[in-house]
Structure formats: C-alpha cells, structure tokens
Image (tube, coloured by chain):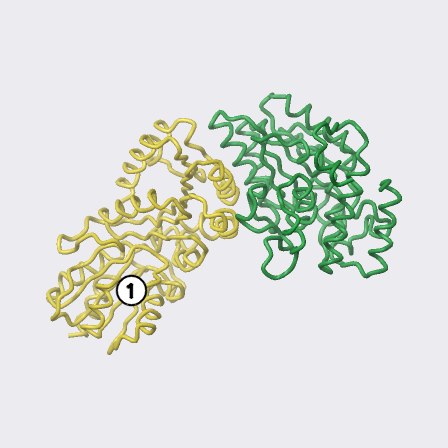
Amino acid sequence: MRKHFSSYIEKVVQENDDIVFVTGDLGYNALENLGIKMGDRFINGGVAEQSMIGIAAGMASQGYRVICYSIAPFVVYRCLEQIRNDVCFHNLPVFVVGNGGGYGYGIMGSSHHAIEDIGVLSGLPNMTCYAPAFIEDMVTSLDHMFTRNGPSYFRLGLGKNMPQYLSLKEYGSGTAINPNAKLTVIAQSPVANNMTAAIDSSGHKSETDIFVINKMPLTTLPDDVRQSIATTGNVLVVEEHISIGGLGSAVSLLINEAALPVKKFTSLRAEGYPGGLYGSQSYHQRLSGIDQGNISEIINAYF
Amino acid sequence: MDNFLKTDITFNPLMDHRQLQGKLRTKILGLHYMANSGHIGCSLSCIDIMVSILKFKEADDTFILSKGHAATALYTMLNEIGEIPDEAMSSFYKDATTLPAHPAPQKYKAIPFATGSLGHGMPLATGVAKAKKLGRKGGISYVLMSDGETNEGTTWESAHFAVANKLDNLIIFVDKNGLQGFGNTADILGDTAAKSVWEAIGFDVVEVDGHSISAMVTAKEAFINNKNGKPKLILANTVKGKGIPYMENKMEWHYLPMNETQYTEAIAKINIDYNL
C-alpha cells in the first residue's frame, strides 16, 4: 500500500504545482524519489511535528495544498491542537498522512501505534479521516481527498489487493446485498484483509454481506448497508481501533437512530495492551481478537 | 478627529502619533468597559505595535496576532483602518458576535487565523512566509507574539525552520512587557525572549521602544530592506497597561474588568496625556 501511495503522490504532485509535501524528518528508503521530483516543494520540517502542521496551515492559507507526513501517532496526538485550531477551524487543505495506523508498527511498541487516531480526529470540524483497506480503495480515497481539498487525515497501513467479490463504492467497497444473507460484516482499514480471509475460509461467504467503510466520521449508514442490516439483523464490525470513537460505535449509534431491529451485534476492535506485553502487529491483532482465526470463529457462531 | 484619522492617507510614521495612540486606547477601554471584560493590560501594551504594523501594511503583507487575548487591540486597529465595521464593534463580547474575546476563524479577511491558544502564530506566519518565498511572491509575513509566548516549544520549532529556510520576509514583533499569566517572565522560565537567544539561532534582532511608533516603523523598514536571508525579530519593550497608571506593570490587569470609577479615571487620564 505504501509503494502504491508513493506512486500516486509522485504522479499527483507532477500534475499539480500547488501541492507541497512536508515530512517530519521521516521517509528513509521511501520518499527519496519524491523529494527529487518535487524539488523545493518537498520540505523537511525537521523533528518538529507541531510546527510542521502550523507551517502547513500557513502555506495552505496562501493557496497551497499541503501533505504532512509522519508516523501516525507522531502526527496525530502531538499535533492535535494544531490540526484542530490551525487546519480544521479554517477549513484548509492540509492532508495529514500517518503511516502505520493501528498496530502497524508492531514490535516498535505502543509509542508507535495509533489505535485511537480516528476517534481523536474524526470529530474535528471539517475533518475527513480516510482509513482504506485495500490498494484499490486507497486510490479512490486519495482521489476523494485531492478533490475535496479539506482538512484530511490519511491512515496508511499494509493493505493487499481488494478481493474480486468486492466492488468499489463511494464509502469504500462492498458486496452486492443478498436478500438471503444472514450476516452483515462491516470493516475498516487493512484489518479488513483479516476479515475477508476469515470469510473466505468460513464457508458462509454466500450468506454474508460485506462492507468496508473507509471514511470517518460516519454520519449516515450507506443505503446498502442499512438495507443489509435490516435484512440480516446480525452485525459484525471489525476495526483496528479502540471502541471509543471508532467504526463500531458509529454503526451502533446509527442503527439505533434508524431503529433497525438487530438480534446480535458484535464489535471486534483494538483492545489496547491486555497483559501489558508487546509484539508484532499480528500478535496484537490476536490479543484483540481481530486476527483471521478469531474473526472466523465469531462469524461461524452466527450460523 | 475620527474623520481626520480615517482619511489621513499622508500619515507620516515619523510624526507624533499621540492622539491616534490615545484614541485607540479610549476605544479599547470602551470595549472592555461595555463588556465588563478583562485582557485590558495586554491590549494596551501592544496597541502601538499594531499601529506600526497595520497602519502601514502593504496589500501583499499578512499579519497574524498570535497573542489572541489582545483581541480588543486588534479589533480596534482593524476598525480604525476600515476592516471591521462599527456595527460589529458594538457587538463585542455579546451573544451572536463575530468578535469574541479571542479572534474567531473565517470572519474577517484581515484576521487570517483564529488565535487564543499561545504558540500558534509563529508557525502559521512562518508557513505564510515560506509560501511567499516558494511562490516567488512579495510581501512580508508579520506576527505579533507575547514574550510569555516564547515559552512555547512551537515558537522555537518554527524559529529554526525560519532560519533554515532563509525566511527574511518574516518579521516577528514580541510585545515584551515582562509579565505573563502568573508572574514575571524573568521568574518563571527566565527571559525566553532574550535578544541573545534569538541572535544565537540566526535571527536579525533589534530592540525598540514598543510605544514609539516612529521607532518601530523605522526598525521595520530597515528589516524589510535587509534581504540577507535571515528572519527578523523586533523586541518591542512595552509596559503592560500602558497609559493607565493604576494598571501599568500589574499582572492583575491581565484579568480584571474596570468598574465605573476606574473606567472614568482611565479615560480622563488618556484624554489629558494623549492630548485628546
């Protein structure tokens, strides 16, 4: 996903001379080419993330669109007030790109994880958070971001190609709704790859409606998602984010507001650091129950 | 007097401006008295700086008030130069106003950024200056900070960025009144606005009397013409509460509103001392 992201950015900055790229002193072995191609529009803001966002907002006020790149937690948590006051209050085209959302940086430890990022940012005024799951919807998310030109957060992770049974949708991707489906699964970010792998191996694919929602805040349920839930009455949400401020919370609220009858609602999400031990991304996914194996068990329990 | 001041296109910065300085002070005091609000001392300490910047601002210059708590000084000066209408001024601090106690976002062209939390103006102005350089555009990016604000880490992050990026189109004014939120700056983190500190990291720095418009305009013009690749800082030595003896150098006048007696006394003092 990162390679495809870089390729996309290299192309878009060549076609648009109003785009500036600012890195918080990161990008070794990834952004060198971009730096060469962009020349003086590629700026290293130093190890100074808060100032980077303020400077980006200042540049955006003068007509530039500014991409700010760092590791997700560094550019989200430290810079929250700059993102809120400088960027969001003024509805400026500053695109905050956080690499390694969720447990993406694995054994690097909790300082490098971002499992509350979307909850922290998605409530800010004018903000759209993008958390694509696959290479294909990463591209459509970027298209959306560079068309909308508002305050944005882009959560980058390790996504694979989208399975062929999913189609791109405005909100992400999904299957066509099946009137005989018994389960509605909704996921976000590359952990959706665990979800699709679990469904592939479950034997229940034909009875499951699958949706991947890659934009937050989620303020309305997409029509097909709502119809699916109304049909199945069974909902499973999978995300690599804590419950508070995440996809599961949003879906739950919207289901209640729409008075959809739901028999069973399961939220699989990042559970933080149970046991206080650390490991790879897949280790943390297992502890949180958002690994393929546990998702399979949860799905099977619905049938 | 109003008409004279608003239409005086031949305004000479090297002339005596006491009447303008006095008139703006009475307007600031009027706003605070009407609203029963604080932040008087910090507005009176920087109103003369604002005159020196905004009265002579070119079309392609930008100005950011980083010490957003001095909003009445900003509103008064922008009203003076026709950027904020009188009707809006009368709504200051009231419900449904465009002029709250700290500047609001996206309300006036002359207020490009909402401020109020300290340490934001310097990175923003640095970004504006960088954008001007990148776009090969003219104009100066001005920012007005408090000396207390130089405690903030973002001030120094962006200061180093400005030096590294050779932003000689960035001119910072520091309202150096020696007082901050809960004490003397010297007693808290020390003098984080010291001339030697800014010079050491690569700024051109000059110290001036922050209540002398001619001194500040002269310093500013010299900096505008000095395209040597170094960002500029004008340390404006000021007095918190300047012009009202019972407020001068008193930390409490960061917070207190005036009662009727105090307001009457303040206006009488300004009328006499500023020849109104």
In the image, residue A179 sits, relative to residue B50, either above or below, namely: below
Q: Nearer the viewer, residue B193 or B20?
A: B20
Relative horizontal placement of residue B207, taking residue A129 as reference (left or right):
right
In the image, residue A249 sits, relative to residue B197, either above or below, namely: below
Q: Position of residue B214 (x, y in %)?
A: 77, 29
Relative horizontal placement of residue B96, taking residue B213 as reference (left or right):
left
Residue type at tag 1: Leu
Q: Hey, which quadrant is residue A11 in on the image?
A: top left
Residue at 80%, 43% (x, y): give it.
B239
Q: Position of residue B123 (x, y in %)?
A: 55, 40
Q: Residues within 10 Å of mark 1 (few under 14, many from 20)?
A: some
- The quarter of the image holding the C terminus of chain A is bottom left
Q: Nearer the viewer, residue B132 or A283?
A: B132
- The quarter of the image holding the N terminus of chain A is top left
Residue ranking furthest to the front: B3
Residue at 52%, 48% (x, y): give it.
B106
The yellow one among the chains is A
In the image, residue A198 sits, relative to residue B117, either above or below, namely: below
Please, which chain is the residue tagged with disc 1 on? Answer: A
| Circle 1 residue | A221
